[in-house]
Image (cartoon, grey):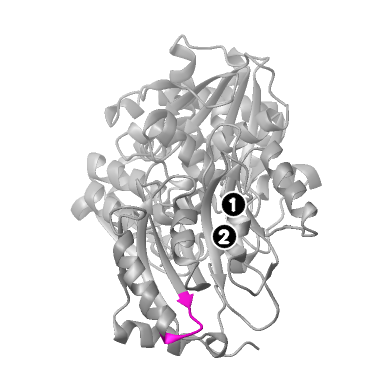
Amino acid sequence: MSQLKDQLFDEILQARQRVYAVGEPTPLQEIRLDGVDAVVFAKREDLGPIKAYKWRGAYNCMAKLSPEQRSGGVVAASAGNHGQGVALAAARLGCKAHIFMPRSTPVVKQNAVRMHGGANVEIVLTGDSYDAASAAAHEFADANGLTFVHPYDDLNTMGGQGTLADEVVMSGKGPFDRVYLQIGGGGLAAGCACWFKKFWPDCKCIGVEGVNQASMKLAVESGERKALSYVDVFCDGTAVRIAGEKTYELCRELLDGFVTVTNDEVCRAIRSLWNGLRVIPEPSGAMGLAALLQDWKAGNITPGERCLVVLSGANMDFAQMGVVASRAGVQESNRHERFLQIPMETKRGQILKYLESIPAGVLLTDVQYGRVAGDIQYPVFGVLGTDEQFAEIDRRLAAKGLKAHDVTQDEDVMFRMISYDRERLSHPVFFVIEFPERPGAFSEFMRGMGEYANLCYFNYQYSGEQVGRALVGLEFESRADRDACRARAEEMKGTTIQSIHELRDDVRHRVLDRMSPSV
């Protein structure tokens, strides 16, 4: 095994002479993280020629091929970034590349492969996973006698990835006490850990995997490579079902431990990178920082330690940004977001009463409520606060004989499945309102309406803008109350709220048609 490590070290040495034919060293940048008393640097691989680190290994591997091997063309399988590296290398080396990608590969990565490779590249979309695309690519390479460029389980590929670590060592910003290294197949972790351990023997090299992607951790802990029965593809750049043969041997020897991170932790790390550097990486690119933040919270990092994370890529489909922002939630320093389901009596003014009992300084970030059958309703409130403020909420509810249930991870809340029952509503009116995004603004609106109406529906989510927008349903005991409330709403425009308008009749009818009796 040590021989394999020595071979990898020699390959990194040689790769230093090749990879810079297509790219420059990427910068090392310090990140200021709210509430983290450690020195944290990010290796900015998102600024490389393909906006990810994979160009290093792909070019090194292909540059070592003989002219005969390149003349026949190469084959690769990729979830995106490796394909871009192979495409770039094919264009620079003048050879054909057949790149097999899952059909679910984000369009931004498909387009980037075509851009870097031009006429030298053929993309073959096949299967619904990297494993399926890889199997098809191997079959094609064998049938046509072509060279397969492995994304991680090849010393030449790992040698190219290791040049990243060489740049860190040569930067003069080290040594680092801790380095967090993402793992898909293990090429980045093996190459970088090999180099760091040679020059900084006391540096802790920590492998980072997704909770439902941890094939390397499973292999090291069980003593053998095993395929995962399920692989989460949210972090698509690290979605590998089974660790590589060579990378397993090297990671088992070189890594000091593993951290597994959830998708929500990754999303919060992306938010931290935006706050600290105004950078938006792809999910796998933020996994190292997610692990560091988890370790800091758990007390595993000593204040003042010097830590390194690799911002490994930024090739994210634009549409995914909305999902990331939603899953990151809202967080400020020591405040965090929770979703609380609070039982409420079915009578006028109850939601307002509970909103006014929220402690000062707590921000309301989400409300999900629809009137259903029964004397007790169960609205869900998203609130941003400290642990002490959440404890105060519990105390205030307990004084009323109530208890909030934490439903932050419940699927119906995540997907905003707001139930409502048309048969329970009386003369309903639906408004779209805009109000200043500040504590107490919605309570002011409800106080103005409370004389006439009972809240039967409320759908609001914090967006980070200066104004909040909500769809509000109000029900009335009489048509007279409904007409008076409409008049009051007009009076409130530009004062208590910034704007308000009632749904058009056709839209209101569609909303009511979607409502059905409770099951």
Tell me the residue at 32%/74% (across/down).
502
Relative height, residue 42 to residue 452 (above, below) = above
Q: Quadrant of the C terminus?
A: bottom right
What label does residue 352 carry, if any?
Answer: 2
Tell me the residue at 62%/39% (across/down).
208
Q: Which secondary structure, mark 2?
A: helix
Label 2 sits on what residue type? Leu
What label does residue 176 carry, if any?
Answer: none
* 504 or 213, nearer to the observer: 504
Side of 489 where 410 appears, left or right? right
Which residue position holds label 1? 356
Q: Do residues under tags 2 and 1 come within 8 Å of each other at their CB atoms?
A: yes
Q: Callout 2: few (<14), some (14-19), or many (20+) C-alpha neighbours within 10 Å?
A: some
Q: Callout 1: few (<14), some (14-19), or many (20+) C-alpha neighbours within 10 Å?
A: few
Q: Position of residue 131 (x, y in %)?
A: 54, 61
Mark 2–mark 1 Cα distance, whole angstroms, equals 6 Å
Highlighted magenta segment, given as a residue range? 474-479
